Amino acid sequence: MNNASSALKVAAGIFLTIALITIVVLLFISAQEATKTAQNNFADIQTELSQAAFTVYDGTTISGSQVTNALRKYADKDQFGIQVITGKNKGGQWYGNELNISQDLNNESYGSVIKTNEKVGNINQTMSEKENQYVNPSGKFKALIVKDKSNVVRGLIFQQS
């Protein structure tokens, strides 16, 4: 009888150990799936936040001082260009990278950097009244965002109104 009791205790211990291991494995697998989902959601949120900085320029009218602030802030950014079209310079001037802007069949505009390692424009000229690139701090500018086909913001266009 003593052997039967010991055998039952050992069998119960093995059964509980297997049950505990099964529970831990199931929890680990479900935790892995939750982690993957959380990582994907976090990546989406990061992308939205990085693009949200540009929503202030989406079809709005801003002042010339805001244009020069945007130039200082974004002109050195990689794969990014800013075009400023003033009353004196109807052709506009690019700062940072020059963009090639094209339209698809749905009249959607897309921009891509022409030469990635070549920076253009001198921001100092936007502050000198004798230059064609002069940006009047109290002037009004229509702002537009330029995105590429992957929906990443590649540039800004400011046109004096």
Image (cartoon, helix red, strand yellow):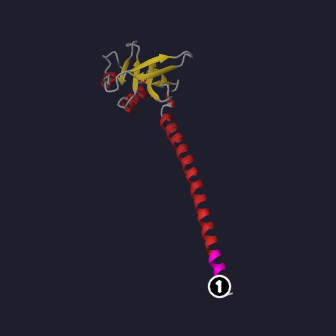
Q: Quadrant of residue 76?
A: top left
Question: On the image, numbered disc 1 is attached to which residue?
Answer: 3
Q: Quadrant of residue 111?
A: top left
Please tell me whether residue 9 belongs to the stretch shown in magenta. Answer: yes
- Of helix, strand and loop, which mostly describes the magenta segment? helix
Whether 36 is drawn above or below 71: the answer is below
Q: How many marks?
A: 1
Q: Residue at x 57, y 57 (%)?
A: 28
Q: Secondary structure at mark 1?
A: helix
Q: Position of residue 1 (x, y in %)?
A: 69, 87
Please tell me whether residue 121 belongs to the stretch shown in magenta. Answer: no
Q: Position of residue 63 (x, y in %)?
A: 45, 25
Q: Residue at x 58, y 62 (%)?
A: 24
Task: Specify start and end residues of the magenta stretch as a single range.
Answer: 5-11
Extreme-right residue of the structure: 1
Whether 128 is drawn above or below 8: the answer is above
Amino acid marked by disc 1: Asn
Q: Residue at x 47, y 37 (%)?
A: 50
Q: Residue at x 52, y 46 (%)?
A: 39
Q: Position of residue 18 (x, y in %)?
A: 61, 67
Q: Position of residue 102 (x, y in %)?
A: 47, 17
